[in-house]
Image: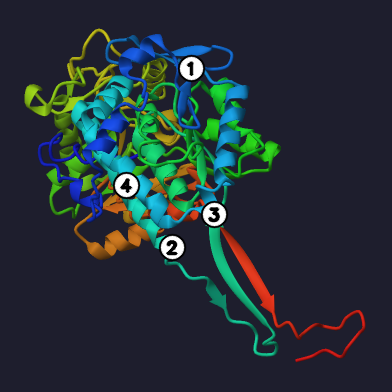
Amino acid sequence: MFVKNSLAGRIFPTGVSLLGWHGKVAFRQRIGAALATAAAGASTPTLTTMATTPATLFISNKFREAREGATFEVLNPATETVLSVCANGGEEDVDEAVKAARACFEGPSWGMSSTGVQRGGCLRALASAIEDDKEAFALAETQDTGKPIEDSEGEIDEAIDYLRYYAGLAEGLDEESPEQLKTPDYNQNFRTRVVREPIGVVGAITPWNYPLCTAVNKVAAALAAGCTVVLKPSELAPSTCLRMAGLAEAAGFPPGALNVVTGEGFPTGDALSRHPGLDKVSFTGSVPTGQRVMAAAAKAGPTDVHLELGGKSAMIVFDDVEEVEAAVDWACVGIFSNSGQVCSATSRLLVQSKIYDQVVSSVVDRASRISVGDPMRRGRDAPGPCMGPLVSGPQKERVLGFVTRAVEGGATVISGDGADRNAAVQKPAVGYYVSPTILSEVSDENEAWDAEIFGPVLCVRRFEEESEAIESANRSEFGLAASVMSSDQERCKRVSRALRAGVVWENCSQCAPVEAPWGGFKKSGVGGRELGRWGLDEFLGVKAITSCKQTFSYNSYGGASPST
């Protein structure tokens, strides 16, 4: 979902660091050595124990195996070898987790019985415990997903920031006064106040591209509000979510506040999305899966649903851009970060004709210098910017299939696998690697221009006029993000408002401050926003309380005359 701190500046030679965009909470509470020691010993499955003991269901602060004993394997995408074996949670397991979450929410230690200060303290303690174990978290993230280790370290930092940010919002809820509504002058006998309360038990289903961050931005906001959570991480990358769960008890969370049920889409994800005991389902993933989640939740409850879905974002580069190479760098950040496995990836590049050849040539040059290979390498050890494998074999085949069909539809590969000239980046023979690929001559009718490929594949096209660029960018079923590159600030403002996207960047790309709302229009999202105070609002219900003077009634059914 998000491009992390370490990517720009280090990866692309003229990059601008994204670090400043991720708001750091000033108060960084650190728990003592005793908590760190306790957290480290909280029966958290390690990469070694997970390979032989699939006790990866975390329910009521305890790890256990699936009731039916079902398991699935997690593969390392860089080596294609088995990394771990996890419990494949079934319907009974999901039911137990939801019931544990319900008991906690309605019990004396959480939900309406807890204070924001209490919940914020737990979130801060969890953040500090993750920080103390950051190296292990980053390693687990890289082994699960294949992303470069330095990028994983940046993602762990960001997850820590999310936890501390929502800790602050949780604490602020204690200071929130009921909103007093003004009543009509003709009747002063009534007074109405509005309060906000946690909505209840939340089912969170998260993807594999940013496993910990995407989970934390749901979990932290829900827990801050006072909700309880049943988290189902992606079966491709569950390790960091499990490590986080293992720290929950030492951080102060009562049994049932945070539960993690590992498993595949069927049976685990299906069982969770249609469980009648949930008050909300929050899902991040593809449009087809999101549609199935929404249908299941509607049939079960109906249950409130929030969907963060796909994107096919456009970057528009105008010929008045002040620094062409900076624009090129942001274009590379927008598509090659995380091997292009980013829902907001600016995978469509629209360049004004006057500078089209210059921009495309420079992007091709940058792509050719990317070092595709071992994700454990650090920048100083690689000949160029690092890019790891895709997350799985099926994902690799899916991406290469899009490229093949794009060429069949008239597109030209000007860099990457299948290029006419020797432009493909060298990559290891083992692992799910795909070279950075650039396609030109991509028509509106070509599948590659419309579909979310979710890989390092950039489609480039020229345009003449501003209106043409806006029309082309908006001609998509998605509406998650977009980028505008121009030295004319009035043009940036004008085009930003004209673009049908929930997130727009001006002279940058993939910047996601925790304080800002995240979500899209059209098929990119349903039901609200994540991050910032908007993310907290998703887990707070609104209650109107109207009171009347005890001496007043309408006297509609006889009795004394109406009093005033």
Q: Is residue 413 visible?
A: no
Q: Nearer the viewer, residue 85 or 386?
A: 85
Of callouts 2 and 3, which one flags the residue occurring earlier in the amino acid sequence? 3
Kind of residue sitting beneath label 1: Ala
Say which residue label 2 marks: 174
Disc 3 is placed on an element classified as: helix
Say which residue label 3 marks: 112
Marks 4 and 3, how far apart in space? 20 Å
Q: Nearer the viewer, residue 3 or 31?
A: 31
- The image quarter containing residue 466 is bottom left
Tell me what residue is drawn at x 19 percent, y 51 percent. 20
Of callouts 1 and 3, which one flags the residue occurring earlier in the amino acid sequence? 1
Question: Is 137 left, or right, of 92 in this rendering?
Answer: left
Q: Between tags 1 and 3, which lies in front?
A: 3
Q: Are marks 1 and 3 in contact (CB under 8 Å)?
A: no
Marks 4 and 2, how far apart in space? 16 Å
Say which residue label 4 marks: 124
Of callouts 4 and 3, which one flags the residue occurring earlier in the amino acid sequence? 3
Tell me what residue is drawn at x 58 percent, y 16 percent. 67
Q: Are marks 4 and 1 in contact (CB under 8 Å)?
A: no
Q: Are marks 2 and 3 in contact (CB under 8 Å)?
A: no
Kind of residue sitting beneath label 4: Arg
Of callouts 4 and 1, which one flags the residue occurring earlier in the amino acid sequence? 1
Say which residue label 1 marks: 87
Q: Nearer the viewer, residue 429 or 380?
A: 380
Instruction: Pick out the residue farthest to the front.
Output: 34
Of callouts 2 and 1, which one flags the residue occurring earlier in the amino acid sequence? 1
Q: Is residue 414 visible?
A: yes
